[in-house]
Amino acid sequence: MQTPNPNRHAHRTNTETIPIDRSRRTNVRIGLVLSAVVAAAAMIGADGAAQSALAASSQTAAPAGSVRAAATAFSGSASPTISGTPSVGAPLTIVDGSDWAPSPDVAWYQWYRSGSAKPGGNWVMVDEGASSKSYTPTAADAGKYLHVGVVYAKAGYANRVWSGGAPVKVAAVTTPTPAAGTSFSGSASPSISGTPSVGAPLTIVDGSDWAPSPDVAWYQWYRSDSAKPGGNWVMVDEGASSKSYTPTAADAGKYLHVGVVYAKAGYANRVWSGGAPVKVAAATTPVAPTPTPTPTPTPTPTPTPTPTPTPTPTPTPTPTPTPGGTAGAPASVSSLEPDAGAAPLGSTDYAIPAGAKFVDPKASAGGDGSIGKPYQTLNAALSGTAAGGTIVLRGGEYHESVAVYKAGITIQAYPSETVWMDGTVPVDGWVRDGSAWRHTGWTVSLDSSPTFTRGAADNTEGNWGFVNPSYPMAAHPDQTYVNGVELQEVQNRAQVVAGTFWVDDANDALVVGTDPSGKSVRSGDTTRAISVRADDVTVRGIGIRRYSTPNPDMGSVTLESTNATLENVIISDSATTGLFVGNSGATIRNVTVEDAGMLGVNSNKSDDLLMDGVKVDGNNTEHFNMAPSAGGIKLNRARGVTIEGSDVTGNGGTGIWFDVSCFQVAVSGTRVSDNGNHGVYFEISSRGVFAGNLIEGNAGNGIRINDGTKSIITRNAVSGNGNGNVVMLQDNRVPVPGHYGVDSRFSAPDPTMPWLNTEIQVIGNTIVGANATPLIWSEDYTSARSWADQGNVANGNLYVRTNGAPASPFKFNTTSRGTVLYGTLSAFRAATGQESAGAEAGTPPAAGKAKVAWPDWALKAFPDIAVD
């Protein structure tokens, strides 16, 4: 393992009592997301008054150097309320507060679902970002609470967010348990009727033996190069459910496959596919009279210099926007330094309730948990504490592994005392062994499986192996420290030199290359600190370090039941993964995860997850390959995730990676910087909001949307990323049944998860680059759809290039046949109709002395950029 910087973690031994106030109100989170969406909506279609109102008031701080009168505040203290009968299928309506004034230019309404009536819980947006005062609960809301939030915006007024009114609980639906044998019947495959040629309609024919008739049927068409099932199918009709499809030129010479899903109350969903595909006749492209197809490029009639792009209703089409205007992110975002991470150990002061049980590692065994006769171990306390009880840990070091099986338990540090759970033990009795030193009697043998499957070999397909051959010991979780400095594990005795160690399993020995004489030597013998296996468990105010966690154990801390909370916890020096979240409703607040061997935070199916003020720093110290899993935060198949006010920096891989079927996620107010691969990666997922973040200095892309439906990128400062700042890519993956990326909790094809770059909005960001890579880049590797076909929008962004780089800031799939590079914003605007409110700054190449003026606020926000 790589040697950590001894100066980085001064907080580990800090026992000074520091008063902290890290409370965050729910309406702050709602306001960040709603304000971002309001701003996006206004930029692409609100009337002029609303647009100017939002431009003036949606930013958290006025651009430095601009002159603006102090914004007037809306008045009113009443909370919004909900009228109507809260039951499935019965419409509900938001009622504005009676004392709200004045009337807004724009009002934005949002509905949320939660498992709790409490404010500040993990709320999931239920109406896909639509702004509507009314909402009709669906079956997914049954038994849940509905909350609402409202944003008012008006010219000359600061945006105002109201929330916190009494939620309503939607009546539970008593779904009859299907009797045995009530699954759909039928073994026939769907078939395709019609003549398979371009322009001739085709129809899906249901199997003749399918029964009974469904309440809902979902039909999907796919294109492939092969007649084989399970190949790389591409969805050809953009997720629309239709029994009919008319092949286009893109289908010529290809095979069309179909899938059908039946759904009915009381029945398990049934998927049929695998019927014989049809091959669309290859187009016999006649040697067409070339003149007619492309009559001299008159698509954009030059006489009319302002082609008023009709897709976006005329919000004062500024063909040459003033760079000092409202384009770009607020200046405050570009210097964002979130107050993230755990409070120093020994500085928290949690109240101790009556009846709490106490633990002290210095106590004698046999205690009863009282303050005068505490338990000696946390395991003993867990055995002696009833569900819902509180366990208070006195200062000291706890060398143990615990599992929590009682609901509602709270584990917390005693006020102003430093608590560490430590996975290592002291090792002494060293004898000289040539140029090294040997300790005999070391019988610890740890699992070194390279993947998450115990005993499985590493992946060999493509570049998908976990272990980098240059670092063959990465998956071996053994750890040894001399005077607190971690040694690097090697493969054999011959490789042992100063700064390294070797586990001699054959002879039950440890061998170190650093002289241990007169020094503290500790080695890892424990694989996991805490496993939470009961609902509503809280852990707060403690540190967890140096656990030798194998990959299949998932993390040094694992949250495996619902509604777990971690607060002011440090997780440090885990051999592979620091924290794993494997169930819904978790809250991770003011937590630091640092120096893990592979991955800081991992999760799977962690719906309704809130990560607030989390610091994820310096993970992948063992140099695992950056894919499939290494880096900062990786979330898989999660719905309703919020990451806010966090700091994700210096990880050896992607900073924040939403992978495989994540839905309705938001990242706001977060710094994602200096990571070894992409900053934020949203992959084969749907409906992400990325608002008000600083994303800079990452080695790969800044923000990358890869097959990500209906995503919003707004008010971010994206600067100096190595391989493109804002990148949107479409590949040929399709969510067919059995695909590894499908969420098994939902029948495939899932209409909410088409894995298509569709309706992406890139609004009001500041995008800065200084290398040859385009500032903004969109590409469809399937050559099926252009940017316009995808329904995407770019507007109100400020594009900044320094010293003439990049030469072509814009790379876009303007046609479905490939990408086109544009050297200036005006050329991009003329060709696409995008960016009516965009601006550019910096020095275009080969422009002589002609420069684009820099806004004052941009100069102050990016002081390190050379301007000549």
Image (cartoon, rainbow, N blue to C red):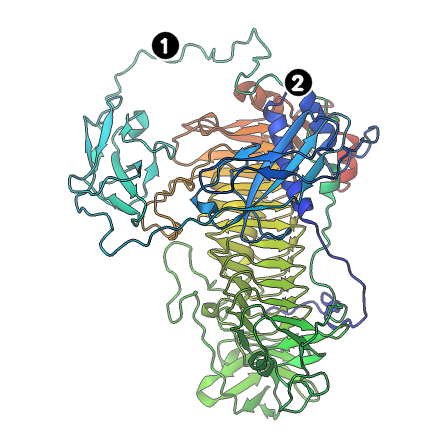
Circle 2 residue: 318
* Residue 773 seen in the current view: no
Circle 2 packing at 10 Å, graded few (<14), some (14-19), many (20+), is: some
Q: Position of residue 512 (x, y in %)?
A: 58, 83
Task: Describe residue 125's horizontal placement relative to residue 351 as left or right.
Answer: left
Answer with left or right where residue 768 lies relative to residue 511: right
Q: Quadrant of residue 192?
A: top left
Tell me residue 8's x, y (percent). Answer: 72, 65
Q: What residue type is labelled 1?
A: Pro
Most foreground residue, 212 or 301: 212
Where is residue 154 drawn, in percent x and y? 72, 27
Which residue extends farthest top? 303
The secondary element bearing badge 2 is classed as loop
- Residue 269 image position (x, y, % from top left): 30, 47
Quarter-wise, where is residue 430 in the image? bottom right
Tag 1 secondary structure: loop
Q: Is residue 325 visible?
A: yes
Look at the picture and state if 503 lies above or below 47: below
* Total numbered badges shown on the rendered structure: 2
Residue in view at x 64 percent, y 84 percent: 521
